[in-house]
């Protein structure tokens, strides 16, 4: 759905700002929207930002967190739940990740692979 601002129609729906600008060790990632890509965003009560990215047909997803200098973390399935290895998430961050994982379940099926 196009966004309308001052009678101008824009294709961009959401533009986010990095709350942790330089001199952070790593710049925020540039995540491009493309067909078959699911992108979700969350900001916790401390202003720490999370971005979940999943491409259709892929078994895993990627989670980016400002709290760990935007280092990409692989999200894989462990007993039906999303697993991010040794990364520590608080309750709200875990809820966001679980919601994203659930929302992309059908996208992980091989029949939805991007061509």
Image (cartoon, rainbow, N blue to C red):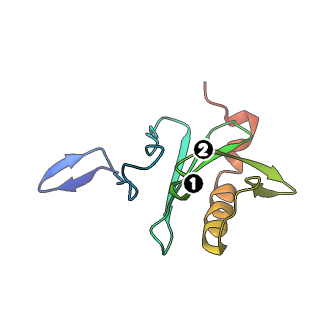
Q: Residue furthest left?
A: 6
Residue where numbered disc 1 is placed: 68
Residue where numbered disc 2 is placed: 72
User: Is disc 1 surrounded by few (<14), some (14 to 19) or many (20+) residues within 10 Å?
Assistant: some
Q: Position of residue 57 (x, y in %)?
A: 69, 36
**Residue drawn at (62%, 58%) of the image:** 100
Q: Are the residues tagged 1 and 2 within 8 Å (C-beta)?
A: no
Q: Position of residue 46 (x, y in %)?
A: 48, 72
User: Is disc 2 surrounded by few (<14), some (14 to 19) or many (20+) residues within 10 Å?
Assistant: some
**Residue drawn at (43%, 39%) of the image:** 30
User: Is disc 2 placed on a helix, strand or loop?
Assistant: loop
The span from disc 1 to disc 2 (Cα, nearest Å) is 9 Å
**Residue drawn at (46%, 40%) of the image:** 31
Quarter of the image where one finds residue 59: top right
User: Is disc 1 placed on a helix, strand or loop?
Assistant: helix
* Residue 87 disc label: none
Q: Position of residue 109 (x, y in %)?
A: 74, 40
Q: Position of residue 42 (x, y in %)?
A: 50, 63
Taking depth in this image into account, of 44 and 78 the one nearest to the observer is 44
């Amino acid at each position: 759905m196009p966004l309308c601002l001052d009678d101008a129609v824009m294709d961009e729906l959401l533009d986010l700002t990095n709350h942790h600008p330089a001199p952070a060790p790593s710049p925020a990632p540039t995540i491009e929207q493309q067909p078959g890509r699911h992108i979700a965003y969350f900001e916790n009560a401390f202003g720490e930002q999370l971005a979940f990215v999943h491409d259709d047909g892929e078994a895993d997803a990627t989670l980016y967190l400002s709290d760990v200098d935007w280092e990409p973390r692989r999200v894989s399935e462990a007993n039906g739940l999303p697993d991010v290895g040794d990364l520590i998430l608080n309750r709200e961050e875990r809820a966001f990740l679980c919601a994203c994982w659930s929302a992309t379940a059908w996208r992980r099926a091989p029949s939805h692979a991007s061509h």
